[in-house]
Amino acid sequence: MSVIRRADPWRDTDVIDARAPRTNQAIVGSLALVAFLTGWWPILGLLAAQLAIGLRFGRRYCLPCLLYFGAIQPRFGEGPIEDSRPPRFANMVGVAFLGGATAAHAIGATTIGWALGLIVAALALLAATTGLCVGCEMYKIGARVRGIRPGNILHVDLAELGADRSEGETVVQFTHPLCTDCRILEGELRAAGRRVVTVDVTRRPELARKYGIALVPTAVAVGPEGLVTARIA
């Protein structure tokens, strides 16, 4: 069965279908729980190895990715497209916890091993069922700690964006062509009668670096003189 894709899962690796990480989380969480219920802790090591292999060699070596993109997505269609960095970081956290759990079991510290394994099971199943990904939120907090936070953009050079400063307030939105939330936000802003100038971070990466854009969509309201008057997203 063919599926119309805006993002190729094997080439457009800077973004991902949001349902793919949730599928991965459901599998990891379920198997971690099975490991606890059966007492067979090597499952935790296998999960850690699979996540590590996928992170190192790419989605084609990630079994849950192959399942989702090869069987589930063609049947149910493509879901919302999101930045792939937060779920990737969440997988790195999963490798650390599952690897730690495996090492703990190997040296006989079973209480610590099961505690780490159950943390992974609980957080992965929480993300799979509700969409609340704690590892993803950790990534975003880390970005803010590194200095990428809403208050950073104080002034925008409208001239380099080709915007007409004489037309009053302008909303400058940093976007990505495969970002679902970006299109939704832009549509809402235009429907509200606001003037929007978009900056495609794939075409203008120097502007993304200049203004410290970590995630899209990022949007700010800018006055005629280039001063940021409000953070919108």
Image: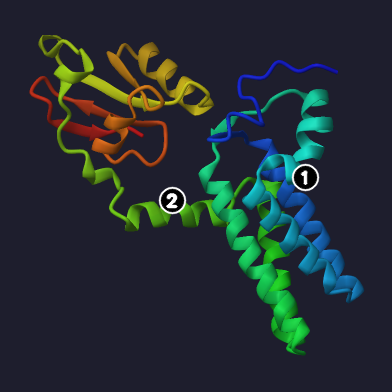
Question: First in sequence: mark 1 or mark 2?
Answer: 1
Which label was assigned to residue 86?
Answer: none
Q: Residue furthest bottom?
A: 108
Q: Would residue 229 appear left or right of 13 to someone viewing this image?
A: left
Compute the Cα span from label 1 to label 2: 24 Å
Residue at (58, 55) in percent of width and height: 90
- Taking 15 as reference, is 119 above or below it? below
Residue at (31, 33) in percent of width and height: 208
Mark 1 residue element? helix
Residue 79 appears in view: yes
Relative image position of residue 34 (x, y in whole percent): 86, 65
Disc 2: CA contacts within 10 A as few (<14), some (14-19) or many (>=20): some
- Quadrant assignment for the N terminus: top right
Amino acid type at image mark 2: Lys
Residue at (17, 32) in percent of width and height: 228
- In the picture of the structure, the residue carrying the numbered disc 2 is 140
Mark 2 residue element? helix
- Quadrant assignment for the C terminus: top left
Disc 1: CA contacts within 10 A as few (<14), some (14-19) or many (>=20): many
Q: Nearest to the eye among marks 1 and 2: give it.
A: 1
Amino acid type at image mark 1: Pro
- Taking 144 as reference, is 10 above or below it? above
Q: Quadrant of residue 98?
A: bottom right
Q: Would residue 157 appear left or right of 182 to someone viewing this image?
A: left
Which label was assigned to residue 64?
Answer: 1
Relative image position of residue 93 (x, y in whole percent): 58, 62
Q: Quadrant of residue 194?
A: top left
Relative image position of residue 124 (x, y in whole percent): 69, 56
